[in-house]
Image (cartoon, rainbow, N blue to C red):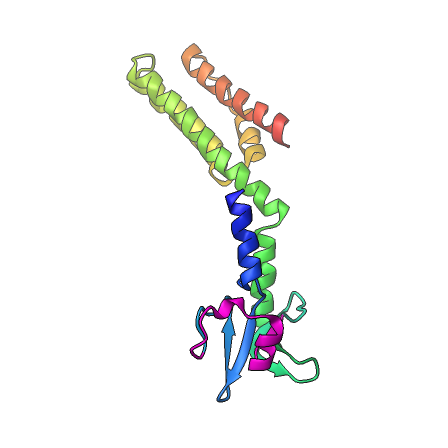
Amino acid sequence: MKKLLLIIALLISGIAFGQKAIEINGQIRVFNTLPKVWNNTINFRASTESDLYALGFRDIVQPNLTQYQKRDTIYMDTVNDVFTYAIKDFTQAEIDAYDQTQLDNDNSANKLLDYKSDGQLWNKRIWDRVMREYDSGNLTNNQFEGISNTLFDALLPLELGLWKVAKSRLDVITPPTNTKMLAILDKAKQIINDYINENY
């Protein structure tokens, strides 16, 4: 309730006015919020619209921009009696940069970003398991090197979010005869197959 009363008080006091501007000695000053004091007038924020107009304050109207335009300098639109901004067209370099930014943030780019983040996480978890098995004595030095060499190239695409590439590489690996190494390979395949089934 207190917050609501404060908002109402601000509206009454004039703080909630939109952007205003005034030209003084050829310079345009923009105000997002009216000053508390203006030319020795205290509580200036309580000024009415007509008071502000009489002093030379005018509303600022934002121009309608296309995707390849931006605001330029502010000026007084004497026809409509408001301040507004000139419109400046993008250069070709700015158009190219804008278009690339849009592509960098479209659905496909964001999807790949998610795939990449998940891929890096699961790649780490698979290698954590390999190291854990080795540290616990479940893999010998030769077995550790063998499964590491077997998995390295196959799992590397996960770092780029290329899950299907990792799957295709795992699928052509000749299964090791050692049951411990085979269990690690099968677990990696299961993780990747489950992820693809759930996310593609």
Q: Looking at the rendering, in which quadrant would you find the N terminus? A: top right
Residue 140's place in the image compared with 64, above or below, is above
Q: Position of residue 62 (x, y in %)?
A: 63, 70
**Residue 89 seen in render:** no
Q: Is residue 14 magenta?
A: no
At horizontal 50% and vertical 67% (from top left) the residue drawn is 45
Q: Is residue 41 magenta?
A: yes
At horizontal 48% and vertical 37% (from top left) the residue drawn is 117
Residue 6's place in the image compared with 177, above or below, is below
Question: Which residue lies most toward the bottom here?
Answer: 25
Quarter-of-image position of residue 144? top left
Q: Position of residue 104 (x, y in %)?
A: 56, 53
Quarter-of-image position of residue 111? top right
Q: Looking at the rendering, in which quadrant would you find the C terminus? A: top right
In this rendering, position of residue 135 left or right of residue 38 = left
Task: Please provide the residue range marked out in magenta.
Answer: 39-61
Task: Using the image as rendered, state which of residue 75 and residue 153 is in the foreground.
Answer: 75
At horizontal 48% and vertical 31% (from top left) the residue drawn is 154
Residue 71's place in the image compared with 25, above or below, is above
